[in-house]
Image (cartoon, coloured by chain):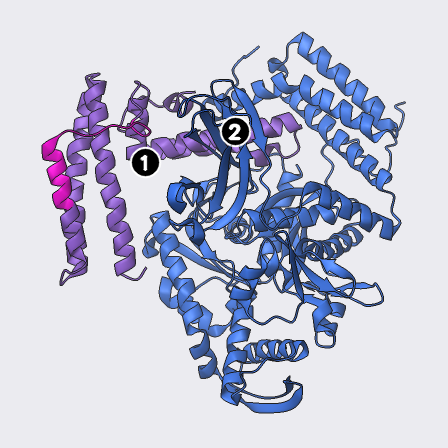
Chain colours: A purple, B blue
Amino acid sequence: MRFFDLFELPVSFQIDNDLLLERYREIQKKVHPDNHANASENEKLLSVQRAAEVNDAYETLKKPLNRAEYMVSEHGFDVRHEQHTIRDGMFLMQQMELREELEEIESASDVEAAFDRFYADIKKLMDEFTEKFESEFKQASYESAADAVRKLRFIYKLKDEAQQLEEKLLDF
Amino acid sequence: MALLQIAEPGQSTNPHEHKLAIGIDLGTTNSLVASVRSGEAKVLPDSQGRFSLPSVVHYGADRTVNVGFAAKANAENDPENTIVSVKRFLGRGLADINSTYGKLPYIFVEKQNKLSLLTSQGEKNPIEVSAEILYVLKQQAENTLGGDLVGAVITVPAHFDDAQRQGTKDAAQLAGINVLRLINEPTAAAVAYGLDSGQEGIVAIYDLGGGTFDISILRLNKGVFEVLSTGGDTALGGDDFDSKIVESILAKAGIDTELSAKSLRKLADLGCKIKEQLSDTDSVDYEIEIESQTTPQKISGSFSKQDFENSIADLVKSTLRSCRRALKDADVEKEQVLEVVMVGGSTRVPYVREQVKAFFAREPLTSIDPDQVVAIGASIQADLLAGNKPDSDMLLLDVTPLSLGLETMGGLVEKVIPRNTTIPVARAQEFTTYKDGQTMMAIHVLQGERELVDDCRSLARFVLKDIPPLTAGIAVIRVTFNIDADGLLSVTALEKSTGVESSIQVKPSYGLEQFEIADMIKASMTNAKEDIQARMLREQQVDAIRMMEALDAAMSESPELLSEDDKLAIEQAIGKLKLTTQGTDGQAIKHAIKFLDDTSQPFAARRMENSIKVALTGHSVDAV
């Protein structure tokens, strides 16, 4: 089952999130185990499997990084599970600098302002590589599109780490 | 003239007849049962008109078992044999209990990872003790509703882990209750409120009970209750408020020696009483006689509201920390929260209400009795699952509260399913061998948020066997983790090169094995002089009828998905089942059910696929 087909949406990174959510709810109303509580054992099992698949499809299309990963995976690039080293020296240098910036936040005089600056830097990179992914994907250059997704994975991971640090430092 | 049809007693001929289903709130301190009658969800009182049953079980030396008020009255005289707040021990080990709860007046026994309490009637597992409470509630419901129940929805704290959920379900099975679904307490409360107000948007449910705390953030939209995130603490509740008071009283009196079980129980009761009184007064005077190293000693004094608030401030603060995290996990700002709902007896404490109000900058909702709201919500869901409301638009989409992971090299945990993932969910992970010719592989499943194995809760360990002996790294084993709509975990494994599949029963570290449950049911039957054969037969008959009704409805709903051959085969299987059900051979009924189930499988599959198309386009697609 292809996820975009399930929700009857065009294969595109730009997605109508409201429509996705609405269709997700409509489908779950039909397949969810709560609507098959009185059914035969086979049907119950079928319903749990179907509902789990629909949840997975929704989760995948909802989040931008998951969506991009899924789109290139349909063209044979499993960036999630592959062992692949990025060889783009410029990009790696940039990553190192960002990591240093993150490490220094802890000792910044105004921690919150430092986080804001960091998130703004990350956002810029995210936009850049998301755009790159989209244009390469549209031109069917899946190899380069996958490369952009690999870089996006780095950037999202950095954002996660920043959020964890923020949680720790700002007493969440 | 048409002949009157007379049904067997208890067997319905009309699939649209109202079925009796209940919602049970199995609480730490009190338990309730509710049901929807004439369209209204209400808590069912006992014969004396009381709505809540104290979750207390007393095992008397004379072999009697008392549950509820009678048992509670015994707590002080016979503390070792009066089990209070047993919910706290479900799915837990001794080390856990000792470190979390400190001094308790019970004699715990732990053998091979199985925890029991030693009573005058022998060892009792927390699951058995819980079953006693559930059994009384079931009886109470049957007496009030006047008939057999098709099943129950039982609520659990949202933050319960797999072992605690499985323990609850096993307890229901022991009590002879068909569990329609386990649902989370805050979600049940949201249902009770949501259906009342018909509101749409984000709501926060703050649920502080006797022993557990939950916070859930939900999004309500056209009957869909979508849980965005949940957080909490399964070992934080009103009981802890009581012990803070006790600690403070003992500290003031300068007592730090071991106390007798009787004194511990007396003190706990005193703590609870002081807490309750401080909701209405500013100060409470107390006087109590306790035994410290067998010398009786009287302590007295006065406890003020300020003392109380100082002693629980840290606990309340930690609940607010959970709220902040849950909001963040849901990606929701405080300002977006439309309503804050208060659930659980401990939200009666004025200080708790004030703090929650200040945190969300909004007056919390308390219009439904915080003690009853969970049971009421559960009964609404039970009514729906029983099939009494075929046209309902309501749907609960809940999440798993804790991340599920696997142990990897070096004692680290790799997450497979992150917390707050919508259930049901299935996720696969692939493994390979690291030695040539390796035929077995040990897998350790953990639940929790931390990175180290030692900081997470161990759910299960199992060994994958019969891996074909190949060069290291060649065999690929795909392990799939499934969390069903009850939030329960199951695991299947598949070796890819041979396609050999094996399913693994996840044995919760502190639960019961299926055969132990069967043995316990048998033992309880012998005691009650009930006939186990009769019960099994009755259960099979009920199953058969339910199945035939469901298929009847399905066939008349979508005849276009049935070929003539399918239809004939299903009708024959139904005919066979009908005939068998009139007999007394339980085993034969079981086989006939299975046969009908298998025969109708392709039809069920077509209906499922078709329903998705219908959901999106509004009209059915011919699939035959």
Task: Read off the residue under disc 2.
Answer: B493
Please tell me which residue lies in front, B246 or B283. Answer: B246
Percent across and percent down for residue B302 are 53, 89
Locate residue A108: give its quadrant: bottom left
Q: Amino acid at mark 1?
A: Lys
Please tell me which residue lies in front, B510 or B175. Answer: B510
Image quarter in which the N terminus of chain B is found: top right
Task: Name the chain letter of the residue that bears numbered label 1.
Answer: A
Q: Amino acid at mark 2?
A: Ala
Residue B329 position (above or below residue A68): below
Looking at the image, residue A34 sits to the left or right of residue B597; the answer is left
Q: Which residues are magenta?
A: A79-98
- The reply to whether label 2 and label 1 mark residues of one chain is no
Looking at the image, residue B418 sits to the left or right of residue B71; the answer is left
Percent across and percent down for residue B575 are 80, 18
Task: Read off the residue under disc 1.
Answer: A63
On residue A38, which mark appears?
A: none
Looking at the image, residue B392 sits to the left or right of residue B325; the answer is right
